[in-house]
Image (cartoon, grey):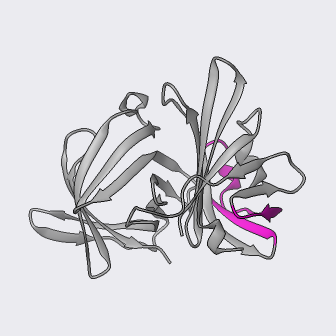
Amino acid sequence: GEDCFRNCDVVDMTFACIGAVDAMHTTLDWVARSNDDDERLGIVIFSDNYQTISTYELNSGKFISSNGGSWNLKGNLMSETVEFDTENNERVGDKIEFEIKLRENELSIVGSDMIFKRIDSGKPGKLQGAWLMSGRVRDGKKQLRDVNRPRKTMKILSGTRFQWIAYNIETKQFMGTGGGTYTTINGEYKESIDFFSRDDSKAGIVLKFDFDIINGEWNHQGFSSKGDPLHEIWIKRN
């Protein structure tokens, strides 16, 4: 919603597509400056039914804020139900509506001076969409979790950008997030981290993982940013 842009002092913005509704399968990206020394980047990623927005300092990678949830578009009216908000968790569960104008490579919010420009078209990444962590493999044994529980870890990807978020829609608690760019080439999933809310010093590192889609499950294997081995299982969110 409009409140998600409250950290931006100017609104000369740029946007990227992942998938009216097809055109909104999109990553929005903008740079907002209050002065020459304060450069901030905002990233919005839309999947079929979910979206996230995050802002962080462009040069240092220092995390500033994030919020997101489910969305729907009817005509030019966008509605959004908030699932997490790092600045105001009382907004969790709220439904927000606002009018937009959508052109081929540009989106604007009616009543504001915000303009977004497309930065990707949903390609070339093979994992675009919203995913929920559904389990892990430990000692060769698959351990699954209920993805319908209030505590969620969601990962949303466009063709070139990713963001993961851990949160609880019942307690309205936010646990952490990170994001950046990614590639999927020859079975290798590679992340370049732009921001990490738990540790700003992780910005700039690159992580490589093996990935495979098996019976609709994204198997994600490698080492975490702490160097710990992991084998995660993710499923597409409806």
Query: Looking at this rendering, what residue extends furthest in the bottom direction?
Result: 215
Q: Position of residue 76 (x, y in %)?
A: 81, 70
Looking at the image, residue 194 lies above or below residue 189? above
Question: In the depicted view, which residue is nearer to us: 55 or 153?
Answer: 55
Question: In the depicted view, which residue is nearer to us: 221 or 59?
Answer: 59
Q: Is residue 185 magenta?
A: no
Q: Position of residue 87 (x, y in %)?
A: 65, 41
Q: Position of residue 78 (x, y in %)?
A: 76, 67
Q: Position of residue 27 (x, y in %)?
A: 58, 56
Looking at the image, residue 85 lies above or below residue 70? above
Say left or right for 202 vs 79.
left
**Residue at image point 65% right, 66% down:** 24
Quarter placement of the N terminus: bottom right
**Residue at image point 62% right, 74% down:** 22
| Magenta residues (range) | 76-104
Say left or right for 150 vs 34.
left
Q: Is residue 53 visible?
A: yes
Residue 220, by quadrant, is bottom left
Say left or right for 232 vs 52.
left
Q: Is residue 97 visible?
A: no
**Residue at image point 81% right, 62% down:** 100
Query: Looking at this rendering, what residue extends furthest in the right direction?
Result: 111
Q: Is residue 98 magenta?
A: yes
Query: Looking at this rendering, what residue extends furthest in the top direction?
Result: 37
Query: Looking at this rendering, what residue extends furthest in the left direction?
Result: 139
Looking at the image, residue 34 lies above or below residue 20? above
